[in-house]
Image (tube, helix red, strand yellow):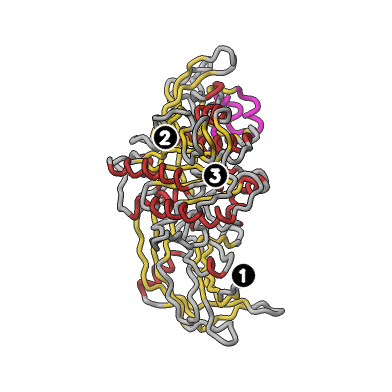
């Protein structure tokens, strides 16, 4: 996560720009606030859904039906909330609706949508929606083949079926449900998905300031930049920060990348603030300016600067224009392949799990497996998951730090999430708990699988979930294994359960900008570890463990493929 000045070391690290949530799509405000508190801005993509239907069953006696489609979101508590509705198409059994629904796709969240098509009687066409929607019967309802025949469309499952297809189109059979015991086939609903172009457009710019005023008594200021988008209500929302430069009144920062989606558009107002860094966290504002990306581009073209200003303290609260200037040395714009492009282009995410048998909290372990697996399983075509245990002694055997959870000597895969839970439950009766707790063998095993897939040209990215009590005895060996694996298509998610001290886990998670180093002095090429203590998430207002744990995965994936210049298949 690493986008906040939590301490001096973290504060002096480079702050990378990451995506911001857009309206629509049911983003969880509580989760967004929790992640922002931890310094992370989620990597979101906007997906535009368009709708049409064919061969609808006619419900009117004299004329054809007048269909309208409504989208509902389903919360974690099961409550339905209307999110979007199309216009009414008069006298049509094959409507193509003009209105589009823009949904914010969040990889780490399972988003559930329900589609309903209504026949709107003529007398209700121009009446308040609360009147006619309660005076109309459900026309058709899209039925996705999901467990318990639930009348809903799971967006994560649907996303794989829509966006991952070359034509990005999913056709759903519509079922008339006036008699729930005898549903009738009543045409088809066609859902087409298109990723908004703003999700792919990235700007890169090199910013510098001149003649900054000193905020320190005995030395020059230590400036850094904070860039915020300005909401319609005038509130700034931080989207990016530049690194701290020590003792410099004319600093030039490293290139900053901003996705157009983060700020709304090139003409959306941005608030750029220059602060003097203080290790206490109370940074002094040197000056600020409000300008758009388009304005920054013009500054670069004209090679001119813009003066910073400062709101004066006092009764008048007037704005003081400073001699300090913000300049743009370089500005470029490009289209980059997104996380969704790679998934549509054939990449898969392969889920792997390793359970620490030195800790036994079955309910928490089950929750972690289900919540993480529920998201990742949609991107794994065969749904056969490698599953291991460690920190246990199999019957009549020595202590093992990596054994197949299903008890097989040759096959480490199980069928689906249910298979993982069944194998774990069975293993509890066939092994005895024994220390010490070692991570190295399990990470090495996962890295071996990822390495073989890479050698064979596989377009797979592996995600290893480790569930542990957090007390490990091979910290340096684990660092060595992680550094070695940082070149491979692999990410490691660690869930800490119980009340142990998780300081060592936080060392493995490089969120403060410090890369892990092996015993040979080799530094990890990228951060591949994400750790979350389950108790923190549980105490965070009902926030799901999966949302914090998976938040960095798309960024880690993109860092890997872009560093190797890998392209998605067309």
Instruction: Sort mark 2 into few (<14), some (14-19) or many (20+) by Cα contacts within 10 Å.
Output: some
What separation in Å lies between label 2 and label 3 (alpha carbons)? 27 Å
Magenta residues span 110-137
Q: Position of residue 299 (x, y in %)?
A: 40, 72
Q: Which structural element holds mark 1?
A: loop
CA gap, disc 2 to disc 1? 43 Å
Q: Which residue is mark 3?
A: 24
> Does 333 appear in magenta?
no
Q: Is-magenta flag for residue 121? A: yes
In the rendered view, would you say 58 is above or below 258? above
- In the depicted structure, whether residue 286 falls above or below residue 547: below
Please state if 488 lies on the left or on the right of 540 as rendered. Answer: left
Q: Residues within 10 Å of mark 3 (few under 14, many from 20)?
A: some
Helix, strand or loop status at disc 2: loop
The residue identified by callout 1 is: 281
Number of numbered discs: 3
Q: Which mark is residue 380?
A: 2
Give the spatial CA distance, label 1 vs label 3: 34 Å
Decide: few, some or many residues near mark 1? Use Cα within 10 Å; few <14, some 14-19, many ≥20.
Answer: few
Q: Where does the image place residue 268, in percent across and percent down from the top left?
A: 49, 60
Are discs 2 and 3 less than 8 Å apart at CB? Answer: no
Q: Residue at x 43, y 31 (%)?
A: 413
The mark nearer the N terminus, 1 or 3, is 3
Dot 2 and dot 1 residues touching (CB under 8 Å) = no
Q: Nearer the viewer, mark 1 or mark 3?
A: 1
Q: Quadrant of residue 351?
A: top left
Residue found farthest to the bottom: 218
- In the displayed orientation, state which residue is furthest to the top: 182
């Amino acid at each position: 996560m690493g986008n906040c000045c939590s301490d001096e070391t973290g504060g002096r690290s480079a702050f990378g720009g990451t995506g911001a949530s857009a309206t629509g799509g049911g983003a969880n405000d509580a989760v967004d606030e929790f992640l922002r508190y931890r310094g992370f801005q989620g990597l979101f993509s906007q997906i535009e859904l368009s709708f049409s239907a064919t061969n609808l069953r006619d419900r009117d006696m004299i004329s054809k039906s007048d269909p309208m489609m409504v989208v509902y979101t389903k919360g974690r508590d099961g409550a339905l909330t209307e999110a979007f509705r199309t216009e009414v198409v008069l006298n049509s059994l094959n409507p193509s609706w003009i209105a589009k629904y823009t949904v914010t796709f969040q990889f780490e969240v399972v988003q559930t949508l329900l589609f309903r098509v209504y026949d709107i009687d003529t007398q209700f066409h121009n009446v308040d929606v609360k009147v006619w929607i309660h005076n109309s019967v459900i026309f058709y309802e899209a039925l996705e083949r999901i467990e318990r025949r639930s009348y809903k469309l799971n967006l994560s499952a649907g996303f794989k079926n829509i966006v991952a297809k070359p034509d990005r189109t999913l056709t759903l059979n519509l079922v008339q449900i006036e008699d729930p015991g005898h549903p009738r086939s009543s045409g088809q609903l066609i859902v087409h998905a298109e990723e908004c172009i703003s999700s792919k457009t990235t700007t890169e710019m090199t910013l510098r300031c001149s003649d900054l005023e000193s905020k320190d008594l005995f030395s020059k200021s230590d400036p850094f930049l904070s860039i915020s988008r300005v909401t319609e209500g005038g509130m700034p929302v931080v989207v990016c920060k530049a690194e701290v430069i020590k003792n410099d009144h004319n600093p030039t920062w490293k290139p900053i990348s901003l996705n157009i989606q983060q700020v709304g558009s090139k003409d959306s107002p941005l608030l750029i603030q220059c602060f003097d860094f203080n290790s206490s966290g109370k940074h002094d504002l040197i000056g600020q300016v409000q300008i758009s990306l388009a304005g920054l581009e013009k500054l670069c073209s004209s090679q001119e600067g813009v003066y910073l200003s400062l709101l004066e303290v006092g009764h008048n609260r007037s704005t003081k224009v400073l001699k300090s200037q913000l300049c743009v040395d370089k500005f470029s714009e490009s289209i980059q392949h997104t996380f969704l492009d790679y998934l549509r282009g054939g990449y898969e995410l392969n889920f792997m799990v390793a359970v620490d048998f030195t800790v036994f909290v079955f309910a928490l372990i089950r929750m972690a497996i289900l919540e993480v697996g529920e998201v990742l399983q949609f991107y794994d075509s065969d749904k056969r998951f490698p599953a291991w245990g460690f920190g246990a002694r199999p019957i009549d055997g020595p202590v093992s730090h990596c054994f197949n959870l299903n008890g097989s000597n040759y096959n480490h895969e199980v069928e689906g999430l249910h298979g993982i839970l069944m194998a774990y439950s069975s293993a509890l009766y066939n092994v005895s708990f024994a220390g010490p707790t070692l991570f190295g063998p399990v990470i090495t095993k996962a890295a071996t699988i990822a390495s073989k897939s890479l050698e064979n040209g596989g377009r797979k990215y592996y995600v290893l979930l480790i569930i542990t009590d957090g007390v490990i005895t091979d910290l340096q060996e684990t660092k060595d294994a992680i550094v070695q694996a940082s070149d491979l298509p692999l990410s490691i998610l660690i869930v800490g359960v119980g009340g142990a001290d998780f300081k060592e886990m936080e060392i493995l998670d490089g969120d403060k900008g410090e890369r892990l180093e092996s015993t040979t002095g080799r530094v990890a090429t990228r951060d591949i570890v994400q750790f979350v203590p389950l108790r923190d998430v549980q105490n965070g207002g009902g926030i799901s463990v999966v949302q914090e744990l998976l938040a960095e995965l798309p960024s880690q994936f993109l860092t890997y493929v872009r560093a190797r210049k890998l392209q998605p298949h067309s």
